[in-house]
């Protein structure tokens, strides 16, 4: 696999975070953790998984090359100190990966929505659709067809409050959906961004809105999709340096770097 060959995975350690607040909880979380741990075993990187927000401290997060928010949803922190620890980790040069309903996480927190790149709005009915690859060289999609058909079905996500400087990697093709839903947005014409990445507040962030079905995480092609997102986050990251971390409150505005 190209992704595995281009990164020294044996030096990498990631944290998989799966906390959900009050509200809908996906049944895919267990399989997503299984998939990420299997990728770790296959490629030689270490994986910790938890739904305990107490792990969000400066001291603990320093050990991780990337934080993977796998289908987190709603409010996932108990204290502002935990939120600030996430901010400081990113500002120090850490990496963030968001999968599917991670976009529904901390919906009232401006900084987190900026980190992920947007926030959840609604999704179309569960059905197959096509994903059009925009950046075929990106490691998260280099292994899939330019028109990637989600034949097992998925959720076509619509998001709002999108950052203007996102690097869009792939878009969902609304023309491949069944029927007409009057709620569908035409902001991007017949497509809607579904996979993207960007540099933010000193760190790097990659997000995919795909991955609703628990069976997705047993699929090698989708696992490679996630692995490629993790690779992009860690490969271009700066060496983590907490001298660059400045947050003292979740409401702190982003500084120029």
Image (cartoon, rainbow, N blue to C red):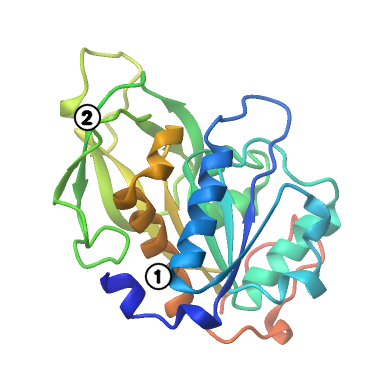
Q: Nearer the viewer, mark 1 or mark 2?
A: 1
* Residue at image coords 19%, 33%: 190
Q: 4 or 103, which lies in front?
A: 4
Q: 31 or 202, which lies in front?
A: 31
- Tell me the tag on residue 174: 2
Name the spot of residue 239 as percent of width and height, x first.
58, 87
Q: Is residue 150 left or right of residue 232?
A: left
- Other residues around mark 1 within 10 Å, as few (<14) / some (14–19) / many (≥20): many
Q: Quadrant of residue 92?
A: bottom right
- Other residues around mark 2 within 10 Å, as few (<14) / some (14–19) / many (≥20): many
* Residue at image coords 47%, 41%: 100
- Which corner quadrant holds the C terminus? bottom right
Mark pair 1, 2: CA separation: 27 Å
Q: Is residue 182 left or right of residue 176?
A: right
* Residue at image coords 26%, 50%: 170
Residue 21 drawn above or below residue 114:
above
Q: Which residue is mark 1?
A: 232
Q: Quadrant of residue 82?
A: bottom right
In the structure shown, which secondary structural element does the residue marked by tag 1 occupy?
helix
Q: Is residue 33 visible?
A: yes
In the structure shown, which secondary structural element does the residue marked by tag 2 occupy?
helix
Name the spot of residue 205 as percent of width and height, x first.
49, 63
Q: Is residue 209 visible?
A: no
Residue 54 drawn above or below residue 66:
above
Q: Marks 2 and 1: in contact by CB < 8 Å? A: no
Residue 155 drawn above or below residue 247:
above
Q: Quadrant of residue 11?
A: bottom right
Q: Is residue 84 left or right of residue 34?
A: right
* Residue at image coords 26%, 30%: 186
Q: 106 or 139, which lies in front?
A: 139
Name the spot of residue 178 as percent of width and height, x first.
20, 16
């Amino acid at each position: 696999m190209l992704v595995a060959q281009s990164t020294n995975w044996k030096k990498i350690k990631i944290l998989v975070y799966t906390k959900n607040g009050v509200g809908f909880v996906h049944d895919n979380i267990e399989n997503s953790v299984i998939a990420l741990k299997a990728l770790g075993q296959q490629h030689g990187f270490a994986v910790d998984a938890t739904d305990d927000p107490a792990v969000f401290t400066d001291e603990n997060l320093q050990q991780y090359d990337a934080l993977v928010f796998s289908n987190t949803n709603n409010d996932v922190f108990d204290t502002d100190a935990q939120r600030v620890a996430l901010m400081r980790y990113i500002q120090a040069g850490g990496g963030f990966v968001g999968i599917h309903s991670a976009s529904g996480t901390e919906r009232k927190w401006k900084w987190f929505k900026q980190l992920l790149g947007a926030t959840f709005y609604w999704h179309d009915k569960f059905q197959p659709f096509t994903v059009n690859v925009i950046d075929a060289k990106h490691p998260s999609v280099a292994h899939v067809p330019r028109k990637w058909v989600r034949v097992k079905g998925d959720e076509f996500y619509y998001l709002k409050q999108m950052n203007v400087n996102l690097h869009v990697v792939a878009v969902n093709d609304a023309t491949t959906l069944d029927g007409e839903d009057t709620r569908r947005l035409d902001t991007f014409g017949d497509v809607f961004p579904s996979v993207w990445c960007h540099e933010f507040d000193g760190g790097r962030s990659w997000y995919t809105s795909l991955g609703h079905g628990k069976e997705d995480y047993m699929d090698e092609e989708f696992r490679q999709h996630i692995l490629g997102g993790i690779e992009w986050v860690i490969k271009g990251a700066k060496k983590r340096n907490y001298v660059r971390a400045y947050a003292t409150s979740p409401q702190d505005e982003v500084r120029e770097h």
